[in-house]
Image: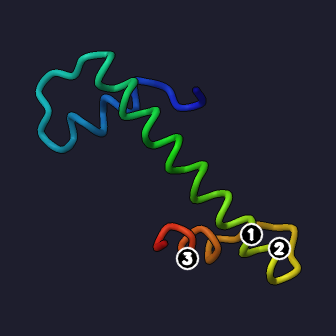
Amino acid sequence: MELTIAPIKKIIKKVGGKRVSNKAAHKLAQILENKGIEICKKAEKLAKAEKRRTVMKKDIKLAAKY
């Protein structure tokens, strides 16, 4: 897993969580990482469709919508 637990705990606390277990933070990190990978794969396809090697902000934004 690429995402670290501390920033994930901060996100959960930011929205009102008083205490956060490591298992909860780890699970959210897994979910976010999987969703991120899914978005990146779509963004990469969008860049290729426009004959670019570089994934750009617009690719990520569009990929995240679908």
What's the residue type where badge 3 is placed? Leu
Seen at 88% across and 80% down, the residue is: 51
Look at the picture and state if 41 lies above or below 11: below
Q: Secondary structure at mark 3?
A: helix
Marks 3 and 1 sit apart, C-alpha to C-alpha, by: 11 Å
**Which residue sits furthest bottom?**
50
C-beta proximity under 8 Å, tags 1 and 2: yes
Q: Which mark is residue 48?
A: 2
- Crowd tier of the residue under label 2, counting other residues whose Cα lies within 10 Å: few below 14, some 14–19, many 20 or above: few
Q: Secondary structure at mark 1?
A: helix
Tell me if 44 is positioned left or right of 9 in this view. Answer: right
Residue bearing the label numbered 3: 62
Tell me if 7 is positioned left or right of 62 in this view. Answer: left
Where's residue 7, x and y in %? 40, 32
Quadrant of the frame with the N terminus: top right
Taking depth in this image into account, of 54 and 27 the one nearest to the observer is 27
Q: Which of the marked residues, 3 or 2, is nearer the chain's N terminus?
A: 2
Seen at 80% across and 80% down, the residue is: 49
Residue bearing the label numbered 1: 45
Q: Which of the marked residues, 3 or 1, is nearer the chain's N terminus?
A: 1
What's the residue type where badge 1 is placed? Lys
Marks 3 and 2 sit apart, C-alpha to C-alpha, by: 14 Å
